Image (cartoon, rainbow, N blue to C red):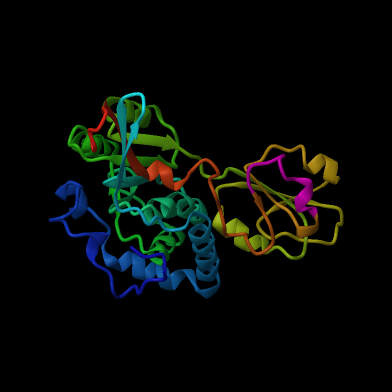
Amino acid sequence: MSSAPSDPEDRSKGGCDANQSALPSWFLDAALSDTPFAEAFDAVGDSRRALLKTAIARLTTVYGASAIAFSSESQGYSNGFTLSRHVRPAHCAFIVIDEHFASPSALLAALMPALLAGVPDVAVVRIAGKKAKQWPDSLLCAMELAGQELAVDVTMESFHTLLADMSGSGVTCRLVLLGRRSQKLIAALAAQCNHDMEFRFLSEPSSLAAWFDHSFDYEAAAWAHPNAVRTCWVTDDDVEAPGWDCVHGSWDEFVVQRNDAWLVPVDHLAGLHGAVDVILGPGEEGSWLYPELNLGYFLHHVVALGPEGVGGC
């Protein structure tokens, strides 16, 4: 897998060999074809692609690529036992969204750690109706640029089937769920997930606040997070923030608001450290991070205790 920009004309369907994949064949057969990815790549345009490339570069630098294909070590202790540790990437990872999800930046923030951890089978799964909407160009382009080649639409019933096929198969799987937390989804996860299949809910950003500064590209931030309520705090009537609702207020009023992220100019960054989870400075309008997500989530860990001198127990 690669996080470098990929050529839309040079893609293998599904991004993996069905004979080697741990994923069910019916699921691989349902993968999106090359065509919508290539069309989305062209439709997004240079400036927005540059925004996504910056987001990918930031995530790649922050997380780094895991050098661990497999590690195993044993330690013997003087009080008579051996501890063995085994670590490898999970066999597969599903980044799960729904038809309402629309943030390419949030998708990349969940997807890139799985790719960088070295998970061999990574799929973006969209739970949709039987007549699924067209995928947003922004999401397809984000996947194209990240080198993510497997995206699949499934109904809720098919999602149940997917989890059932994976559960108990001995295949280790990690799920990151970015869509809405419906009762049907929670029930499906509760019925099938076990020690080999772990899941974590993360949220698409729903609210952004900005302290106005001319250094920000407000249209870019609105494009990156189209579902979020976006509020820009201003002190001057003659400024505009396209795609944002502008309100008048003081800095003290601004910093006590509850939001998923703040866009803050450089000279104000220090004033928010420790007060909020995600702060974006100028030039990072298309970037996103989930502070609670790391490469370790996508690694499978096994520890074993045994008698002294028994290595690899």
| In this picture, residue 191 sits left or right of residue 243 | left
Is residue 310 placed above or below 153 in the rendered structure? above
Of 309 and 102, the residue lying toward us: 309
Question: What residue is shown at x 20% (from left), y 53% (from top)?
Answer: 28
* The quarter of the displayed image where residue 273 is located: top right
Of 171 and 94, the residue lying toward us: 171
* The quarter of the displayed image where residue 250 is located: top right
Quarter the C terminus occupies: top left
Question: What residue is shown at x 48% (from left), y 43% (from top)?
Answer: 293
Of 145 and 126, the residue lying toward us: 145
* The quarter of the displayed image where residue 185 is located: top left
Question: What residue is shown at x 52% (from left), y 60% (from top)?
Answer: 61
In the image, is residue 48 part of the stretch drawn in magenta? no
Furthest-left residue in this view: 19
Quarter the N terminus occupies: bottom left
| In this picture, residue 44 sits left or right of residue 239 | left
Is residue 265 placed above or below 50 in the rendered structure? above
| Percent x, y of residue 237 | 86, 57
Q: Which residues are magenta?
A: 268-278
